[in-house]
Image (tube, rainbow, N blue to C red):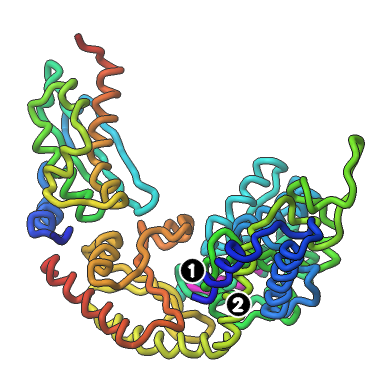
């Protein structure tokens, strides 16, 4: 299957949860210097559950589709659950097989969400 | 094919170390290695084989100059002039020197047609204590060919030396280092149909003689005692340890192959492809093309950006259609920042490309626009 499946192009043109959060628990910006993909995420946690999330930045169709799908998937999850999300989840959500270079694009959003969650944990340790 | 065959011959038939042993296989290996050096000397029209140093690649060659000539001659407050279109290999070694000894770096800007801003360059020579002008011959992003002969002369008028990054140009243009008047010229095998892991530093004999060694070890010495060692003559002074023998032999074979075609012919053919491809590319809606748009003083490289489509997606889609291009910053991040873009997609023509290849590429780009409903 081509990487340019309809759902990926659609998410690239109409991303989910795009923008900025007014009230933020934590943010992180991840950047892939090899290709210039640049993703920033804002996370809002309430009682250690993710209440809301927004993302923005520049990136290829794979990185944008990936962060869109992830942003829907993480809503309502606990800090622990978010930190446990494996790389395989991303490819599962995308529904296409990726070589090592494009895999990096796909994982950029997950890295941003993980790093943001980790800084939230450092700022506000939870049981 | 003949490059690989020549390297295989080394590994299968006479794989011995060079410059050491007296048995026949080693003699053959040494002869072939030195013959490759002679081929390269002739290819770039250097005066002597003493001026041809084998390195790992162009990056190592530039580092060699930075950490021998550079450390020896540059001091705090001296300026090395680069340009914003340089490859990282011709930026980072000088940044390392800046950290180590406090030299200044000046990055010369470009005109809006993607050429070096020579007015700015002339001003820098008047304002600063410039000791080295280090520039790319042909930009691997923009295709711009810098007027090296004129710039080397400018550098020398102001008491500066000139180093040229010929990684791209050596494979696509006829190079005559004596005519250009440059002090150092670097190139790399992997860009000229040769193997990876082999590069060349050309340096004027007088300069190389005055420079201290780069790496220390076997081959670059004449004698070693516990107290001190003495250095071997050129070019061996700068070739420490067992070199990439197969790589050098392979590079020699690659150069023979290119010489058979003829560098002038290669450049003319690339220009023909460029003149075919550029107007057709320009017709694609939403495309922005970087670099000089006429075919004077430029090579067969076209970097472009498609509105609404990330360069990575362009390269991936073209790859699915068996058209190989590169997307990204091409190891030229400062240039991307200067142009205010995250990256470009780059088409690079070579003598094995055809107009049909260009047609296939352009057709794929139109298809991609459809997929993104542009």
Rendered location of residue B114, percent (x, y):
47, 73
- Mark 1 surroundings within 10 Å by alpha-carbon count, few (fewer than 14), some (14 through 19), many (20 or more): many
Q: Which one is in front, B195 or B307? A: B195
Say if the magenta span includes residue B117. yes
Please report contact status of discs 2 and 1: CB closer than 8 Å, yes or no: no
Res. B185 image quadrant: bottom right
In the displayed structure, B191 sits above or below A54; it is: below
- Choose the circle earlier in sequence order: 2 or 1: 1
Q: Which one is in front, A52 or B53? A: B53
In this view of the protein, can residue A12 be seen by the observer?
yes
Kindly identify which chain the residue marked by label 1 belongs to: B
Rendered location of residue B339, percent (x, y):
41, 63
Q: Identify the disc placed on residue B140.
A: 1
- In the rendered structure, the answer to whether residue B198 lies left or right of residue B112 reads right
Mark 2, residue position: B255
**What is the spatial separation of the Cα atoms under label 2 and label 1, in whole angstroms?**
20 Å
In the displayed structure, A104 sits above or below A114; it is: below
Rendered location of residue A103, percent (x, y):
26, 47
- In the rendered structure, the answer to whether residue B341 lies left or right of residue B107 reads left
Q: Residue at x 19, y 38 (%)?
A: A88
Kindly identify which chain the residue marked by label 2 belongs to: B
* SS at badge 1: loop
Q: Residue at x 68, y 46 (%)?
A: B97
**Quadrant of image for the C terminus of chain B:** bottom left
- In the rendered structure, the answer to whether residue B28 lies left or right of residue B167 reads right
Say if the magenta span includes residue B190. no
In the displayed structure, A10 sits above or below B361; it is: above
- Mark 2 surroundings within 10 Å by alpha-carbon count, few (fewer than 14), some (14 through 19), many (20 or more): many
Magenta range = B114-121
Rendered location of residue B289, percent (x, y):
35, 74
């Amino acid at each position: 299957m081509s990487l340019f499946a309809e759902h990926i192009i659609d998410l690239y043109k109409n991303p989910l949860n795009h923008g900025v959060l007014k009230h933020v628990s934590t943010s992180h910006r991840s950047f892939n210097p090899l290709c210039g993909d640049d993703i920033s995420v804002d996370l809002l946690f309430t009682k250690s559950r993710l209440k809301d999330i927004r993302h923005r930045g520049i990136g290829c169709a794979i990185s944008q589709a990936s962060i869109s799908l992830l942003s829907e998937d993480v809503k309502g999850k606990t800090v622990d659950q978010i930190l446990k999300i494996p790389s395989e989840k991303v490819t599962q959500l995308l529904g296409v097989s990726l070589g090592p270079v494009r895999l990096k694009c796909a994982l950029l959003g997950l890295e941003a969400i993980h790093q943001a969650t980790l800084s939230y944990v450092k700022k506000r340790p939870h049981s | 094919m003949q490059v690989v065959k020549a390297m295989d011959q080394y590994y299968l038939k006479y794989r011995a170390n060079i410059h050491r042993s007296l048995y026949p296989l080693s003699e053959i290996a040494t002869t072939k290695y030195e013959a490759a050096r002679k081929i390269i000397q002739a290819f770039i029209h250097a005066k002597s084989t003493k001026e041809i140093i084998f390195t790992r690649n162009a990056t190592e060659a530039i580092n060699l100059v930075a950490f021998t000539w550079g450390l020896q001659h540059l001091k705090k407050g001296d300026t090395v002039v680069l340009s914003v279109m340089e490859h990282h290999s011709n930026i980072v070694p000088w940044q390392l020197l800046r950290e180590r000894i406090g030299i200044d770096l000046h990055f010369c800007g470009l005109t809006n047609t993607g050429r070096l801003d020579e007015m700015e360059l002339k001003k820098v020579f008047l304002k600063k204590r410039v000791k080295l002008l280090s520039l790319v011959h042909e930009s691997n992003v923009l295709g711009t060919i810098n007027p090296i002969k004129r710039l080397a002369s400018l550098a020398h008028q102001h008491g500066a030396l000139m180093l040229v990054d010929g990684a791209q140009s050596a494979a696509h243009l006829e190079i005559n280092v004596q005519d250009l008047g440059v002090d150092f010229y670097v190139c790399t095998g992997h860009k000229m149909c040769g193997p990876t892991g082999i590069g060349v530093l050309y340096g004027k004999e007088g300069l190389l003689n005055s420079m201290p060694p780069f790496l220390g070890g076997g081959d670059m010495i004449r004698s070693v005692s516990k107290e001190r060692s003495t250095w071997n003559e050129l070019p061996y002074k700068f070739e420490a340890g067992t070199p990439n023998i197969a790589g050098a032999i392979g590079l020699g074979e690659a150069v023979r192959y290119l010489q058979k075609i003829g560098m002038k012919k290669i450049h003319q053919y690339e220009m023909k492809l460029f003149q075919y491809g550029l107007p057709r590319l320009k017709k694609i809606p939403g495309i922005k093309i970087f670099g000089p748009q006429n075919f004077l003083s430029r090579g067969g490289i076209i970097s472009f950006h498609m509105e609404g489509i990330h360069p990575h997606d362009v390269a991936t889609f073209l790859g699915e259609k068996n058209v190989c291009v590169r997307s990204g910053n091409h190891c030229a991040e400062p240039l991307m920042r200067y142009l205010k873009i995250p990256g470009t997609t780059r088409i690079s023509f070579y003598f094995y490309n055809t107009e049909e290849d260009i047609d296939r590429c352009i057709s794929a780009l139109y298809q991609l626009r459809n997929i993104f409903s542009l």
